[in-house]
Structures are given as structure tokens and as C-alpha cells.
Amino acid sequence: MNNLILFYLGSHPDHQGRYLSEIFEQDDIWLEVTHDYIQWLFPTKEFSRVTPNAPTITKEIENEFLNDELLRDHLKASLFRLLSFYSLEYSKDKIIKSSNWNERKNNWFTQDTHNNLRITRIIKSLNSLGLGNLAQLFYNCLLELQESEKDYGIGSNTIEYWKQAIGKIN
């Protein structure tokens, strides 16, 4: 069985010996400064220059996720952990700001950072692995924040990447 599938089932570590559950338990500082876990939580079809040994989505992996509810549930848990990191949360079929939004938004929202690349990856991964509905909710939330928050600092190029990731190419 594929290493990514085993990782997502919780029976196999990533390339650094970390299990999925251990990554979920890391604090936000660790998530911010560690750069090689995101490719395991949210694999895409593209090769990663940052983590060359990171898994990529093959047709086999895509089919496994599409046909296995447990894999999708663990992918959803990965999303919810990263939403928390971004001071967002899933609530009643929406993604909204968390109670600590004002304390944490400067980490990614008021300027272009590597976290915007992570968000692009998250959207692409969710779309490819059977959670396109959550990718769309995340994208909708980002657009709402762009409109409603006066200290929005994410560049227009980033928004274009997010549009492409969700499949809204002009």
C-alpha cells in the first residue's frame, strides 16, 4: 500500500518519522516554522521543490481517497487543524473567523506570506481528494474576508492562484 495512504490511515509516519496524529498535536508556532509537513497533510499532483520526497497525488491515491470515508475524514481533520492555525473554523456549513481572529490574523492575513502558498495547496488537495465542497467553502471565506476586513494585505496574484486552485479561471 502507498506510504501516503498508510500515513493517512495512521499506521505509517511521514519522511521525518511523524504520524498524522502527532502533527495534529503540534502547536501553532511549530506549524508556522516547520515547512515539510504540509505536503503530507495536503498532497497535490505537483512535485514539491521544498520537500522533494513528499508524496504526490497519483490516480491510485485519488481513487483511494474518493472511495474511503476514513481517509476523507482524516483529510477533513487536517483541514480543521489548519483552519484553527489560521484563526478560522468550520461551523454550520461555513468557514468563519474564530474568536482569536484579531490576535492571529497578522500571521498570514495582513501581508503576503508563505501561508498563502499553503492555502493554495490546501484548496488543490481538497479538490483532488474528494472534499471539493470544503475547498469551495474555504475559498468563499477567503473572498468574504477580502471584502470585509480593512487590513487585508494579500496580493492580487495570490487571489488569482486561489481562483485557479478552486477552478475559477477567468
Image (cartoon, rainbow, N blue to C red):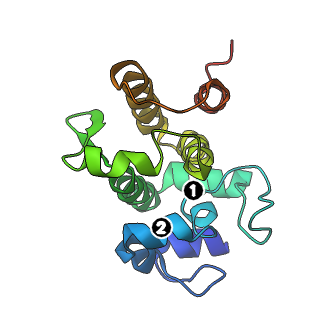
Distance between the alpha carbons at the discs numbered 2 and 1:
14 Å
Residue at the extreme front of the image, as rendered:
151
x, y percent for residue 83: 37, 50
Q: Amino acid under label 1?
A: Phe
Q: Which residue is mark 1?
A: 42
x, y percent for residue 38: 58, 62
Report whether residue 76 is seen: yes
x, y percent for residue 30: 46, 73
Disc 1 secondary structure class? loop
Q: Which residue is mark 2?
A: 31
- Residue 146's disc is none
Residue at point 51%, 43% (across, down): 130
x, y percent for residue 51: 74, 68
Q: Nearer the viewer, residue 10 or 37?
A: 37
Residue at point 27%, 44% (across, down): 102
Residue 30 vs 17, above or below: the answer is: above
